Image (tube, rainbow, N blue to C red):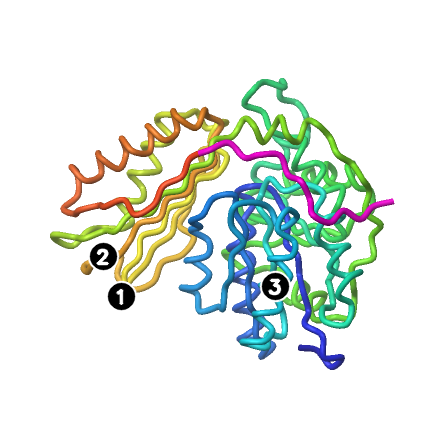
Amino acid sequence: MNESGKTRMLVLGGYLGAGKTTLAVNIARSLKEKRDRSVSIIMNDQGDVLVDTEYSKNAGFDTRDIMGGCFCTNFDNFVSSARTLVTSGKPDVIIAEPIGTSTNIMSSVVAPMRSLYPDEFSVAPFTVVVDCVRALDILSKKENRTEDVVDIIPAHQIREAEIVILSKADLVNKDTLEKVKEAVDTILPGIRMIESSSVDLRNMDEIMDFILSDEISTKTPTGEQNKGFAFEKAKLGWYSGTFDLVPKEDVDMYSLETDIMRGIAKEYGSKSIVHVKVLVESEESAAKMSLVEDTMQVDGIYGSRYIKTPGKLVLNARVVSPPKKLEDTMRALIDDMVTKYPMELVMTGEKCFTPKPESPSHFFFE
């Protein structure tokens, strides 16, 4: 808590695959190690099993999740989770990460939070993460609007922002980075932008400075409800699956996760792969990888790259696909992995669906 006795809250928005969770964990680590501040995290998902929650917990942070819909449709649960974190751990900062397809977060989450609970929480400026690698394709509107193109939601998320963090800045050259800034500034002229990278942690001090400052969210929310949001969300199939993993011999987690990603990439074109995440973990080791379009990366790994004792596999996929096709694809991939690697996989949970339109429980706008 700060000197006023309030818990600082940062709502970290942005589209699927922008790097929000990696950034949230890096911020939490930096605040703990460099500023001696405690941090808790609230995750959010349409499904009921979340790779990012496990990743955050493995990183050592008290983490809650709101499942089955956006913070906006579960606002009372969101507030309850935040209060529980304050009661149990008394964190200085809570980082809240909405679903990547969430819209109207300013009017349905940030504004209600700052207006209804001003004595409990100091709400930082609403911060939206933009992926430098994909930004130009999404924001430039040079692509023809086909059933595979998603651009309305990311542009709207930027319009709601009070601060924009440009993630993965290390993966683009200076010219591309300047074009990304121009594209963002065209959508929201004068918006404050901060470059970031999970590799070199550039500008982390600047990010921590505004989080720990007295600067609060003040932007007036608008009541923009575009039917296109629902249309874009309806394109996506969302798959979540959990499996108990029992190795018969040492299993290379890196190789296993890479093969899963390659299988999905082979089935779907890069433009249809919005965000895929897979986590393999046991008590001794864990590895998380992600796939966005045609870019695959290791988000985190600890212990050996080999899983030697019983653990679990968690798989989340957000793909432009009918849910049934996505479910069949994932099941076939899992079957292939069992034949390829010396292990048993037993499904403990599965859900595949198209997200329903959001119905915010609180909606503040002018």
Q: Which mark is residue 307?
A: 2
- Using the image as rendered, state which of residue 49 and residue 198 is in the foreground: 49
Q: In this view, does 271 lie to the left or right of 155?
A: left
Give the residue pinned by disc 3: 80
**x, y (%) of residue 119?**
77, 72
C-alpha separation, residue under disc 3 versus residue under disc 1: 33 Å
Residue 260 vertical placement versus 55 (above, below): above
Q: Does residue 358 belong to the magenta stretch?
A: yes
Q: What stretch is highlighted in magenta?
A: 353-366
Mark 2 or mark 1, earlier in chain: 1
Q: In which quarter of the image is the N terminus?
A: bottom right
**x, y (%) of residue 317?**
43, 38
Which class describes the residues within 10 Å of circle 3: few (<14), some (14-19), or many (20+)?
A: few
Q: In this view, does 147 lie to the left or right of 341?
A: right
Residue 244 vertical placement versus 334 (above, below): below
- Using the image as rendered, state which of residue 281 and residue 296 is in the foreground: 281
Give the residue pinned by disc 1: 284
For the point 35% across and 48% down, which residue is it?
314
Report if the CB atoms under discs 2 and 1 are less than 8 Å apart. Answer: yes
**x, y (%) of residue 170?**
55, 49
